[in-house]
Amino acid sequence: MSYAQTYPDHIAYLQTGYEEALAAHGFDAVVLCSGAAAMKNRFDDQAWPLSPTPAYAHWCPLPEPDTYVIVRPGKKPQLVRTVVDDYWETPPPPESDHFFSAFDVLEVKPGLAGDSLPGGKVAVITRDAGTSPPGAVNPAGLITALDLLRTKKTAYEIECLAEASIRAARGHQHVARAFQAGTPSELELHLAYLQASEQDDAAAPYKNIVALGPHTAILHYVAYQRDKVSGDTSFLIDAGAKVLGYGSDITRTHVRGNGPAARRFANLLAHVDAVQQDICRRIRPGMSYEDLHDESHRLLAVALRELGIGRASPSELVDRGITRALFPHGLGHSLGICVHDAGMKPRPPRPDNKFLRNTSVIEAGQVFTIEPGIYVIDGLLGPLQADDRRDLVDWSAIADLRQFGGIRVEDNILVEANGVRNLTREAFAAV
Ligand code: GLY
Ligand code: MN
Ligand code: MN
């Protein structure tokens, strides 16, 4: 299938969903602003690359500043582009032109011409409240409804995410080989990933997390070091790719070496990978994602017990906070236009799951990540060692693992009526 074939149904889904949301929240029209160029610093003249408003990007993969999608019930959507005569800069062209014919396209001079604005009660979805067109700015109820529309993916969006997974898988495979074959630095691995996945740093869906050894235990590590690392070590890379505004979010952990600590880490890695696949197999529509997160703690506890790292029953390892010290983040989150997309957190998680970003009921059409991990984070393990939980952990195993840092295995999962499609493993198999 090509984007041109699947995009019309995507637009039809959006038109229906938007008409319902506008009626429910009492609006006659909505203006979705792509966003204005944001300066990095008011003492300089550099702007950040444009990261369009998610509601705008849901309709239109055109990363141009000061562009607007206008949606009205019963009317073809309008795409209003601001034409500037600028010989200093130009926005990147779209990756494909399949979408233009879905819109009435209008070109205006800077300042969104008044006659292109809809009448009646207008909502404006914008990142730049000070400079956006007139209307009710970011009404909360409407934003929630539009966020919810992004949680069910159309065939077009699945195609974009599948391609984003393939591009990322090429990068992952390339750097996995480079890590095993030599002694690359974090910076070299980061740059090699960008090259193999054919993207610039600023165009990636999020800043690559590329860490060697103990740095792998820093969850959002982006401080790429230049020193070459030799000998037994670990490598964690959490990196995706973007296609027509949709991003993948993939993590793989690797280990190099044959020393006893490297073998212990490799064994733990194999167990975390098996737990991750086990969780993916259990996913069914109707389940609660938070239950799945709880299940991941139980499965990790079984693995820790089996490996002798945990010295109590799996249920005690969970109930007494051992797994929460070793796996401190959520099992996953909604994925699509934003890497941590909104719409799948209808309520806060339980306090003991405080970093969980997905509390939805699982439904066919959702795309989310499944990303369990185990990390040696001294700030979280210290309290266990200092109180009556010290005997529940094999501290010599922790000492062995510390130089290898942490493990995360992250796949992007599409929920289907009777199971899942694992877009990540499918992409690795394809490349
Ligand atoms: N790449 C950030 C995350 O996995 O959530
Ligand atoms: Mn993620
Ligand atoms: Mn990630």
Image (cartoon, rainbow, N blue to C red):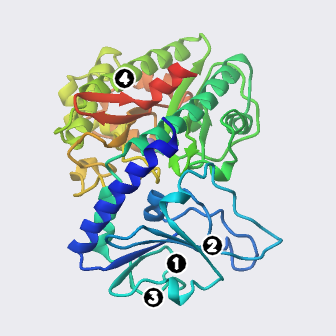
Q: Are marks 3 and 1 in contact (CB under 8 Å)?
A: no
- Residue topped by disc 3: 134
- With respect to residue 411, does 61 lie above or below? below
* Residue topped by disc 1: 128
Residue sitting at x 64%, y 72% = 37
Question: Disc 3 to disc 2, how far (Cα)?
Answer: 20 Å
First reached walking from the N terminus: tag 3 or tag 1 = 1
> Could you tell me the amino acid type at mark 2?
Ala
User: Which residue bears the numbered disc 2?
Assistant: 38
- Looking at the picture, tell me which residue is in the foreground, 304 or 337: 337
Measure the C-alpha gap from mark 3 to mark 1: 12 Å
- Tell me the residue that label 4 is attached to: 394
What residue appears at the point 61 percent right and 24 percent down from the top-left corner?
173
Q: Is residue 367 left or right of residue 56?
A: left
Quadrant holding the C terminus: top right
Label 1 crowd bin: few (<14), some (14–19), many (20+), radius 10 Å = some
Amino acid under label 1? Answer: Asp
**Residue at (53%, 52%) from the top-left corner?**
245
Q: Amino acid at mark 4?
A: Asp
Q: Nearer the viewer, residue 57 or 175?
A: 57
Q: Give the mark nearest the N terminus, 1 or 2.
A: 2
The spot of residue 68 in percent (x, y) is 52, 72
- Given the current orientation, which residue lies at the most extreme right position? 87
Is 419 or 341 nearer to us in this picture? 419
Q: CA distance from mark 4 to mark 1?
A: 52 Å
User: Which comes sooner in the sequence, label 2 or label 4?
Assistant: 2
N-terminal of the pair, mark 3 or mark 2, is 2
Badge 4 crowding class, 10 Å Cα cut-off, few under 14, some 14 to 19, many 20 or more, is some
